[in-house]
Image (cartoon, helix red, strand yellow):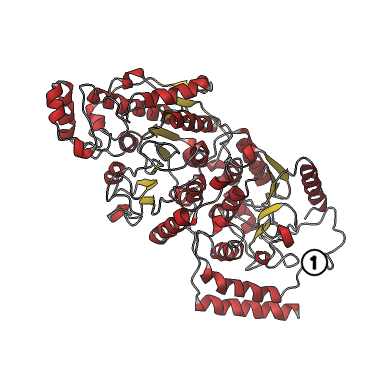
Amino acid sequence: MSEGILAKVGQWFKIMRHYGGIKNTILSLYRYDDLKTGNFIGADKYGNRYYQNTRYFVGRSRWVQYADRVGLDYDASQTGLKNADYMYIFFNIILPIAYEYDPDLVLVSAGYDLALGCPEGEMKVTPDTFAHLTHYLKGLANGKVMVLLEGGYCIDTLAESAAWTLRSLLGDPCSPLQACANPDLTVKKTVACCKNILKDYWQSLRIDLTEKSQVWIEEALHKRSLNELATNENRPTQYDLTPTLIIDRTEEQSKKIQQNIKRAIELAPHQKPLERGPTLLVYDELMRKFSVGNHCERPGRIVAVWKGLKSRGLDQRCTMIPSRHATKDEILLVHTNRFYDDLETTKTQTKKELQKREGVSRSVDYTNEVFDNALLAAGSCLNMVDAIMTDKGRNGFAIIRPPGHHAHSGMDYGFCYFNNVAICARYLQKNYNLQRILIVDFDYHMGDGVKDVFYEDPGVLYISLHCNDAFPPNEGHPKDSGKDKGLGFNVNIGWLNFDPPAVDADYINAFHHVVLPMAYEFNPEFVLVCAGFDAAEGDRIGWGKLTACAYSQMTHMLLPLANGRVLEVLEGGYCLHQLNICGSACVATLLGDVPVRCSEDSAKYPQDDVSVRTIQMIKDIHRPYWSSLFTIPDQDDNEIDKLAENLQKTASIKN
């Protein structure tokens, strides 16, 4: 390791403490480190002369919870770890702790010797992965992230990795990674042990039951007893300034590594399609025509969002996309011909005839304008899809009404007539031949219409975060997970207990523990968001306590997916003040602005009664379908026997 770099980080840490006691998170992503100050979160591979069991090194006295390290030390020679392994560590340990700690500054000890081709780390992490890791760190500390170069000894991947890190700092979109599935067994063991040790200090890690990891802790302790622990007393007092790096590879191995490097670089090129395009908006005053008295789904909803954007100058930074009406064929991608024709009759019905329609039990109302208004909403969303897919913009926000996620193929329901997001997904499948579409729904109410449309479709991963006991009745339970080929692709994060109401940290932790691991394993080509704001505090229908922070952070966390192709479509939200604030927070984040930071301490900690119970159940239900979800490996007799042999060999060598 570089003592000079360590001194530099340490000096910076002292300077920051001088200026107002700033909280720092120091992130290590390189092979060896023994930094013991600040809030240190590392994902390192240790050799025989460094801390052999860092899960027990969690600081001293009052710093006990502020020195958290993820040491991959079950086998000191463990190599070949890949993108999925480091994303697994990030989502399970680093991000939950970092968000709970809420730093004022993030220092990244950026060693690229874990990149593909480096003879020092011998890992298989592709260079573009560092853009993703950096992006997620930018969600902290109001975006104050400082990256300090450490190791990295393969020139090709060092250059690419540094370039991708810089691009992420500049706000460029991330290159899509290959599906991050099947994390390494060593990583799963290590993360399980870390959680078991650290959950006493970090509330966000208590979401998982970790008692079964005790067998792996005992295994690690046994290994530790066979190796000398490096301390200040026995560590060398000086190091070679330019140590010789011995590369023990055959010509065939070197050739294969170069081929893998070339392929990785080709899969993530630095070219124009990856440049940040503008954020797109669609808004049309004609969508105000449909109005039913003092109904909560009223025209003022979209006006509130639009005024919020204009008052903050966000509309001037976006590109406006023209609205249009959807065609009948486009609506029939999701809805039945009978339903379409029946709703069309509302255009010419008298007021008395409209009042006689059976809509009260389904929470829908009718006027002569509702049909055209619903067509305009759906068609405007499709215009946004076309604009993003043809690179006229990178992402977008559709300010439309009426909403759509409750609408079924043959029935309007819950203020919804045509299912805007479902139509967009089918349109993408048909017109652009997309195979993997992610739909994230953070409306207070579960989108039962979206669920039904794709219930048997493995090409659409639908993840809904909602109150389980809210409208619609008997829908959205976590156990409802899809059917046939679609089994596991319907994910209901339905909060089982909404008393107390969910706060920002509950939603953010659901993203860390469930949404992001699944999303990276699914590897979507497009992300659609049912953007409902009725879980915000003060809503007339929802009973949540979310702030703009949660919506901003959730948007930020989705942006690295699908090459940045993210379209948020307005659904619910009935407090005009919150629509103004939260809509602007989402659009600002789509534009690349720093996401909103939690301001209330109460919003930084996931609640046991809300998060723990629900997220544990979600993981138990979906673990058979998603290898990226946190798992404690089962004890395998053959593996233990092999381990015992390796330990005996290690002991004999040391003796």
The residue sitting at the right extreme is 237
In the image: residue 408, left or right of residue 565:
left
The residue shown at (32%, 31%) is 296
**Residue at 72% in and 57% down:** 63
> Horizontal and vertical percent for residue 602?
55, 47
Q: Which residue is mark 1?
A: 231
Q: Nearer the viewer, residue 549 or 37?
A: 549
The x, y position of residue 577, in whole percent, is: 45, 29
The quadrant of the rendering that contains the C terminus is: bottom right
Q: Tag 1, which secondary structure?
A: loop
- Residue at image x 17%, y 25%? 346
Query: In the picture, which quadrant includes the N terminus?
Result: bottom right
Q: Pick the residue in front: 325 or 594.
A: 594
- Residue 290: x %, y % from top left: 27, 23
- Specify the amino acid type for callout 1: Thr
The quadrant holding residue 142 is top right
Camera-nearest residue between 271 and 625 = 625
